Amino acid sequence: MDLMIRVLTDRWTVFVPIIAALALAVTWGRSLSGAAVVVVAAALIGAVLAAVYHAEVVAHRVGEPFGSLVLAVAVTVIEVALIVTLMISGGDKAASLARDTVFAAVMITCNGIFGLSLLVGALRRRVAVFNAEGTGAALATVATLATLSLVLPTFTTSQAGPEFSAGQLAFAAVASLALYGLFVMVQTVRHPDDFLPVEGNGVVTDEDVHSESPTAKAALLSLVMLFVALVCVVGLAKVVSPSIESAVADAGLPPSAVGVVIALLVLLPETLAAVRAARRDQVQISLNLALGSAMASIGLTIPAIAVATIWLDGPLVLGLGATQMVLLALTIVVGVLTVVPGRATLLQGGVHLALFSAFVFLAVSP
């Protein structure tokens, strides 16, 4: 059946983002009552589900490996806009917002989504199989970007505190953007086969070739609705953030817990899309989403923040603390050991999920 008809038939995927947009317009900038928080949360969940549906339609139209970039880049661009907006309005209190958000995104994607994808894939057929060359290249890029942007500021001496000087920030921004652009070129033009799903015998396969592709109209409709849904996800997450902050403060938790909750909400569409791909025995697509999201989060956020510092007042803290650096280093080491064989069992998925759990626990109880 033509996917244009399918999109129109599944009317909830069109109506829910519109309802979420109306909820965002009504509640933006206002204090919410308990009932309003429940309504906004329901609209947020609906927008997430709709975003996953439309992202899969667009990804099916453009094919892999381009499809994996659609959701990752779309979410990250809107996430960057949200960070810059909050930093402009937050003043000195938002000095570490970019660092906390980017680090949370890296830990959620490289451990949470990564581990969950391996776990689902291994449960499906005992061993999750993926392309070690492409996944290894993505992991190396993430490790380099994270070190340049989040670790080095802790040790540089040109600026007091865990901050870059203006020149160092400019270098980090240019290097991040260039490295991300180079990776996208390699993934989509030079070596796209390295990022396609593989079968148990290591043969590259692309199931989209054997299934009906959406029409241009269906893909365009889904692209528009994907953008609307993602805007609603990020906007509604910001709307409910004061309620989350109040709940966190009442529970006696540190402010960093708020950033983790918001990052989890923003990355929920990618998480669901990755799990659905793993359930279809396309673990490589899941890993593309996870590592691509981490890479885009750093490669787009740091340049955007560097430009925003022209208008921002106050310090910009990018350097990680000791506990965060330990978690990042362990994530990279474990990630390398997981990726090299090109296959993973339940154990590897469990190890990554254990690291993700440690990150969440230490964010709540530092």
Image (spheres, helix red, strand yellow):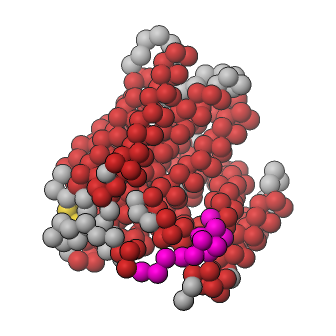
Question: Which image quarter: residue 200?
Answer: bottom left
Is 22 located above or below residue 158 in the figure? below
Residue 42, given in percent of the width and then of the height, sits at 67, 71
Residue 197 in sight here: yes
Is 293 located above or below residue 206 in the figure? above
Count the numbered circles shown.
0
* Residue drawn at point x = 55 percent, y = 49 percent: 76
Residue at the farthest bottom position = 1
Is 144 located above or below residue 40 in the figure? above
Is 37 located above or below residue 357 in the figure? below
Residue 264 in sight here: no
Residue 171, given in percent of the width and then of the height, sits at 47, 22
Q: Is residue 216 magenta?
A: yes
Residue 131, given in percent of the width and then of the height, sits at 25, 59
| Magenta segment | 211-223
* Residue drawn at point x = 25 percent, y = 62 percent: 130
- The N terminus appears in which quarter of the rendering? bottom right
* Residue drawn at point x = 35 percent, y = 40 percent: 141
* Residue drawn at point x = 59 percent, y = 32 percent: 305
Q: Is residue 144 magenta?
A: no
On screen, residue 281 versus residue 92, left or right, reads left
On screen, residue 260 versus residue 89, left or right, reads left
Residue 154, given in percent of the width and then of the height, sits at 42, 23
Question: Which image quarter: residue 86?
Answer: top right
Q: Nearer the viewer, residue 145 or 222?
A: 222
Q: Nearer the viewer, residue 199 or 297?
A: 199
Residue at the farthest top position = 158
Kindly report the secondary structure that dominates the magenta region of the rendered protein: helix
Q: Nearer the viewer, residue 169 or 66?
A: 66
On screen, residue 86 versus residue 248, left or right, reads right
